[in-house]
Amino acid sequence: MKSFRLKAPIILLIVILSALHLCQCHTNSRSAYERIRAHADVIKVINTHEHQHRADEVPATRFRFYQLLAAAYLEADIISAGAPPFDMRLIDTASLDHLWETYGNALTHTRNTSYYSHFVKGFGKLYGFDDLFFTKENIVRLSSEIERNYTDYGAWFDEAFKKAGFEVMFLDQYWKPFNTEVDKRYYALVFHINPLISESCKKPDRGAELKTIYKNASADGFAINNLDDYLAYCDHLFKKNIEKNAVCVKNSQAYSRTLFYEDVPYEEARVLFDKPSSRLTPSESKKLEDFLFHWIIKKSAEYDLPVQIHTGYLAGNGNTLDNSRPGLLNNLFLKYPGTKFDLFHGGFPWTGEFAALGKMFPNVYLNLVWLPQISRQEAVNSLDMMLDCVPYNKILWGGDCHLIEESAGSLEYGKDVVCEVLAKRVERGLLTEDVAFDIVDRIFRQNAIEVFKLE
Ligand SMILES: [Zn+2]
């Protein structure tokens, strides 16, 4: 009894001290995240990949919530949840009530996904929307604000771009790859090279109507009769893009073919090019494409342009995932040590393979672009793993969105992921806060300046 009386205050003291210690750890962990996040929030972000469309480039006649939803990645999750494909005519004309009846149920079933959450975050940042989920009611309110903003899209874009914290976006105009005019107040030009590769084996028959690259060549005064002519026109396009300050080339061919590009000798490609394209076998067409990409990589090194490549998961609701595996590019990294390769999307789901390539090759850079929106948790896990493997001057970030609301959400989400990983590392004593600040600066700005030699 006596001994209990003596021990009781000591036990109580221990309990209080442990509680205080726990509490302090908790406060520190919150404040480590908050301090790193506050640092991230003042960076002028260099966004290494976007597909921003002007309002008049989106197939919508008016802009309300559902038009933005149709342009967002979340559309794919809604279809995956069982909704019918998005019908723009219906979206433009039906009432919000009717659209909720059509898409609301599937939208509700996507409340768990990262596509959903980052989309909400964009409205949080730009519209002060502080609900966690979309509802039939709050969409009405949001819709009228969207409609008001889009009556003067130019002014709205300018306001939103600044509010989101961007300094510049790399603009990949895959929908008009020959356009070299971009608004320099917001964008840096990306030279989208898919058609140069894919059309090498689609030479029009004599007398047939010219399409895309052949049509452009003819308009620019180039006649394409053989492989050398074709390469001369491709070189002209390189020069034209460089004149307009292109910062890199971009390959997103994993959407239509394998990322394995074999090394095809010039002589073989020349003979294949001379053959009518309609008589090429699939493997001959692939050989011509492969030759073209090797040629482009060599040219990119010559013109000092990094090569961005889509790897991993493919947007939409149906494609061949295996085509996009990052390890398929390995032969290129070995053969072209003088070219900088910027690999996209964490190579998801091959995030380990992606990181291994960045670790092995000094000329392979790892871009987190879009990964946080595909899976927030996978982005957290794989960034943590990348930081174990790869020097942090090789990690980049981009948004990969079509409209500014979603880009703002992607940046909020990207910062959330990066700051969470770094805060945990600071708490575990693996990093100091000032190194964490440096990593944030590097991922969202400084690495892009160095890799792409921005002014
Ligand atoms: Zn993209």
Image (cartoon, rainbow, N blue to C red):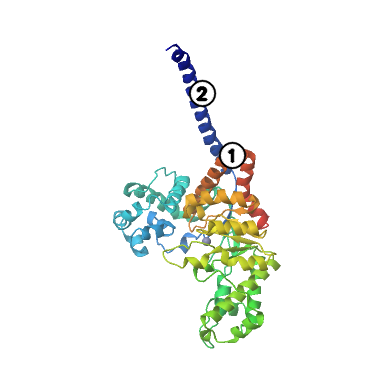
Q: Which mark is residue 125?
A: none
Dot 2 amino acid type: Leu
User: Considering depth in this image, is 354 or 395 the residue closer to the camera?
Assistant: 354
Foreground: 217 or 13?
13
- Residue 149 spot, x, y in % from top left: 44, 51
Direction from residue 156 to residue 271 in the image, left or right: right
The outermost residue toward the top is: 2
Q: Which residue is mark 2?
A: 17
The relative height of residue 274 versus residue 178 in the rendered view (above or below) is below
| Residue drawn where x is 46% and y is 19% of the image | 12
> Farthest residue toward the bottom?
206
**Quadrant, the N terminus:** top left
Instruction: Note whether residue 329 is visible.
Output: yes
Residue type at mark 1: give it: Val
Which quarter of the rendering shows the C terminus?
bottom right
Q: Is residue 2 left or right of residue 307?
A: left
Query: Which residue corresponds to the image point at 67% horizontal and 70% vertical from the top-left?
Result: 298
Q: Nearer the viewer, residue 289 or 445?
A: 289
Q: Of circles 2 and 1, which is in front?
A: 2
Crowd class of label 1 (few under 14; some 14 to 19; many from 20; radius 10 Å): many
The residue at the point 44 percent across, 54 percent down is: 150
Q: Badge 2: how crowded within 10 Å, few (<14), some, or many (20+)?
A: few
Please give the residue where the numbered disc 1 appears in the rendered image: 426
Q: Does the beta carbon at disc 2 come under 8 Å from ligand 1?
A: no
Q: CA distance from mark 2 to mark 1?
A: 23 Å
Label 2 element class: helix
